[in-house]
Image: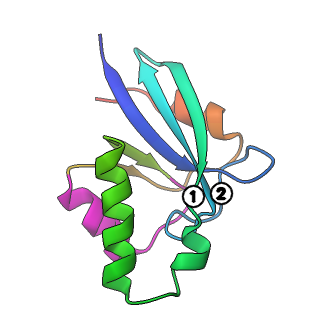
Amino acid sequence: MSTVNVCIPVADDEQVGKSWGKAHTVALATVEDGTITSWRTEAVRWDISHDQGTEGSHHARVARFVKDNAITTVVARHMGESMENMLTKLGVRVLQGVAGDARGAVTSLQPFG
């Protein structure tokens, strides 16, 4: 069985949010063999904290969230190059350019490997 912990920014209408690093809310999904087995949303408020402090402190905040939630894949419409580099260094798979229904976006990204 293949299990992946996915994180995706979500808008109020459950569409993929516009930006990863400035997301207000993210969804955390557990995907087992291509099926979402758990889905929860969390208000991370990175849209507010993004401009409070340095880029490094913002990246550290995001990295801590990713580690604390054992995220293995981040799916997003957009993120900056430095954010993508930071996530990649953590061993997180980054998939960008995704839009539409957030749950559909997560389940359509196969194979997860």
User: Which residue is found at the position 31% from the left and 71% from the top?
Assistant: 60
User: Which residue is found at the position 59% from the left and 35% from the top?
Assistant: 40
Report the Cα–Cα distance between label 2 and label 1.
7 Å
Pick the residue in front: 60 or 81: 60
Circle 2 residue? 17
Nearer the camera: disc 2 or disc 1: 2
Q: Position of residue 11 (x, y in %)?
A: 72, 54
Q: Position of residue 110 (x, y in %)?
A: 43, 27
Residue range of the region highlighted in magenta in the rendering: 76-90
Q: Position of residue 112 (x, y in %)?
A: 35, 30
In the rendered structure, which disc, 2 or 1, sits on the residue that comes first in sequence?
Answer: 2
Tag 2 secondary structure: loop
Circle 1 residue? 77
User: Which residue is found at the position 45% from the left and 27% from the top?
Assistant: 30
Does the stretch in magenta take in 88? yes
Quarter of the image holding residue 22? bottom right
- Please tell me the numbered disc located at residue 112: none
The vertical placement of 55 against 46, above or below, is below
Q: Quadrant of the C terminus?
A: top left
Crowding around mark 1 (Cα neighbors within 10 Å: few <14, some 14 to 19, many 20+) is some
User: Which residue is found at the position 49% from the left and 69% from the top?
Assistant: 21
Q: Position of residue 76 (x, y in %)?
A: 52, 54
**What type is the residue that disc 2 sits on?**
Gly
| Image side of residue 100 versus residue 74, left or right | right
| Image side of residue 9 versus residue 4, left or right | right
Look at the numbered discs 2 and 1 and tell me whether their residues touch, using CB distance below 8 Å.
Answer: yes
| Image side of residue 103 versus residue 44, left or right | right
**What type is the residue that disc 1 sits on?**
Arg
Q: Quadrant of the N terminus?
A: top left
The total of numbered circles placed on residues is: 2
